[in-house]
Image (spheres, grey):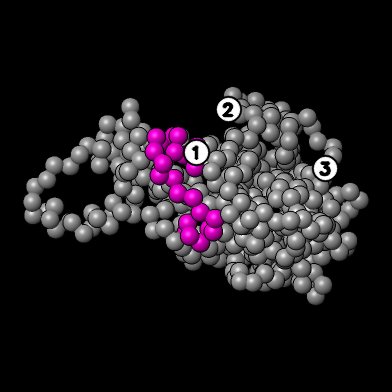
Amino acid sequence: MKNAHQFPNALSRRTFLKRAGATAAAVVAVPAFIPASALGRGGAVAPSERIVLGAIGIGNRGSYVLDCFLPEPGVQFVAICDVRRERRLAVKQKADTLYGNTDCAMYRDLRELLARTDIDAVLIATGPNWHALASILSAQAGKDVYCEKPCTKNIAESLILARTFRRTGRVFQAGTQRRSLPNFAFAVELAQRGKLGKLHTLHAQPRGLEAKSSGWYPPETAPADEQVDWDLYLGPAAWRPFNKRLLNAFNFEKGGGFMGDFGGGGCLEWGSHCVDLCQWANEADHTAAVEYWPEGNQLHARYANGVKLVMRDDGWLPLGSCPVRFEGEDGWVETGDNGEMAASPEGLIASPRPRIAGYPANFHVRDFLACVRTRGRTRADADAACWAHVTCHAANIAQFLNRKVKFDPVKCEFIGDEEANRLRSEALREPWRI
């Protein structure tokens, strides 16, 4: 059975529909033979169902997610954009080997990739400094977006991201793939359906609560722009001299990056997964907690419905990384990345259910592709991503100020707190704008 990868020169969805409209009268007037492949028969994917994909910023994590896209029927990967030449070449070689040609285009500047009218969707896996701006530019260019997390650097970016995707009607999927895994989804279902009784406490593992800067390293001789375009790498972040240590986005995430640097810092790195799951369980995908305060080595928050959120790194059952726990008046459930679950009463999880260990992105990618085709809402759409990130950012601000803050999710501002409100956003470096 043939698949889409055997049709590298097939029409894109947009080209197919445009040509179909232009020739509609001729089709009516003159009988024509239509190839079965154009109708999606014989195992082929009809041109109207094909998704032409580009990628922006593909390193270790991005390569994994791209590998989840490539085998999917109907996906045709055509272009890679990265500020690092070695990464552009590596992705091009992968694509050209897959398709048996040399057609994969390479770009250093994402604006050149986004100018292509044949590309339907983009995978964004840059460092967190670029996630929000690249997603917004992509939506404005008419592209659907799968973006790795954390998706934003501050509260203002989160709100603009959600507004942009609502206004443009583009599809967005945050890379919070645990929303597509059965153990986490089942735990959320127990909470939402009242199986735990009235929900009162949610627990998330942020994996680090320190809010600090990514830092400033000693200047080193910068490579040629063709090798590493340092100016594009910095993008909207405040300028700093080239240093090889800053080329590793993983260091930014682990090192913080709070307020004006490369990442979201503090509780956001894993909070964009775990807090996101707590938001989902609390049916809070369109709002945020209203109070935040540090308490010992934990961060606490409270929602308007009285449910408490506890962000802590210790005291978890041995259920793997990225655990969450939901507690109600009649019981509790806890789960993590090994796919197992614990609950009280035990009967809550007694029935057979699928178990998937680890945190694969395949299911999340398929949800995104299905929504690109149907124009539906993904499991981790821009609104859900926005409010989970707002909750994390607000918690970071409470941690940074080392005191309680109160937040109004309707006005999207801290109540009577100018110092906290100044931390909702940051200036972008010229010439970048949101």
Please name the amino acid that badge 1 sits on: Gln
Q: Is residue 361 above or below residue 28?
A: above
Q: Nearer the viewer, residue 35 or 379?
A: 35
Helix, strand or loop status at disc 3: loop
Q: Residue 191 location, x and y as percent?
A: 66, 43
Tell me: 417 left or right of 334: right
Q: Residue 108, located in which quarter of the rendered image?
A: bottom right
**Residue 222 position in % (x across, y down):** 70, 56
Q: Can see residue 93? A: yes
Name the image quarter holding the N terminus. Answer: top left
Position of the C terminus by quadrant: bottom right
Q: Residue at x 64, y 72 (%)?
A: 430
Question: Residue 363 colored magenta?
Answer: no
Mark 2 or mark 3, earlier in chain: 3
Element on which disc 2 rests: loop
Q: Is residue 80 above or below residue 403?
A: above
Q: In the displayed image of the protein, which residue is found farthest to the left?
A: 30
> Residues in magenta?
92-114
Give the Cα separation between the discs numbered 2 and 3.
Answer: 27 Å
Q: What residue is pinned by disc 2? A: 354
**Does 361 sit left or right of 214 as displayed?**
left
Which amino acid is tagged 2? Answer: Pro
Give the number of the disc on residue 93: 1
Nearest to N terminus: mark 2 or mark 1: 1
Nearer to us: label 3 or label 1: 1
Report the residue at 40% width, 44% height from top.
Answer: 103
Residue at disc 1, secondary structure? helix
Q: Residue at x 17, y 42 (%)?
A: 34
Q: Is residue 109 magenta?
A: yes
Q: What residue is rendered at 77% in x and 55% in y?
A: 220
Q: Residues within 10 Å of mark 2 (few under 14, many from 20)?
A: few
